[in-house]
Image: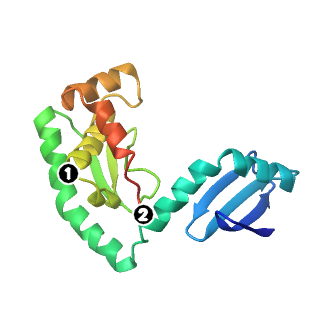
Amino acid sequence: MTYQDPDFGTVIVTVNPRARSIIMRPEVGGLRVTAFRGASLAFVKSTIERFRSSLLKKQNMLKSHPLLTAVDVEQMRKEAKASLPRRVAELAHLYGFSYSNLTIRDSKTRWGSCSALNSISLSLYLMQVPEHLQDYVILHELCHTVHHNHSVQFWALMDEVTDGKAHALRKELRKYHTN
């Protein structure tokens, strides 16, 4: 079902029988909503109303940050592969971490990850953030080679390698988004 909203533009509502909740994704020209089977349109609209202000903020952010072209992404990939492996090696050496492998991926949902085998994966979109935040993400994943969770010990180690600025850097990184 589709309807027009004065703020969002086109709202597209689809039903997914496997959905257990309502998922709302702002887009440049509208809002895409996935609802669970049996959810009434009135319930969907009331849910949109509850989250209207935050959804509009996200939509406005999408509008103010134009989407990257394939050429832009490929250029970022080259830059990431040229600089990130060197920086990971430098920081690992500086702080005494070891990792098994490093990959650069087109991940749009997370900046990085660390597997149980200490293989680190970084998003090429890190090239869009300042260097000190790139270092924060790299150190975050390197700390996961020691603590594979977000325990108190993990954050203590993060504070140790970031001079006590782990939470401030984390907060600053939240201002950035993969495109």
Vertical position of residue 128 compared to residue 120: above or below: below
Vertical position of residue 14 compared to residue 49: above or below: below
Rendered location of residue 121, percent (x, y):
34, 51
**Which quadrant: the C terminus?**
bottom left
**Distance Cα–Cα, label 2 vs label 1:** 18 Å
Task: Answer with left or right where residue 143 lies relative to residue 53.
Answer: left
Q: How many marks?
A: 2
**Which quadrant: the N terminus?**
bottom right
Could you tell me which residue is drawn at 33 percent across and 34 percent down?
144
Color style of the picture: rainbow
Element type at mark 1? helix
Residue tagged by mark 1?
Answer: 131
Rendered location of residue 30, percent (x, y):
63, 67
Instruction: Identify the mark nearer the N-term, 2 or 1.
Output: 1
Could you tell me which residue is drawn at 29 percent across and 68 percent down?
77
Could you tell me which residue is drawn at 25 percent across and 39 percent down?
139
Q: Amino acid at mark 1?
A: Glu
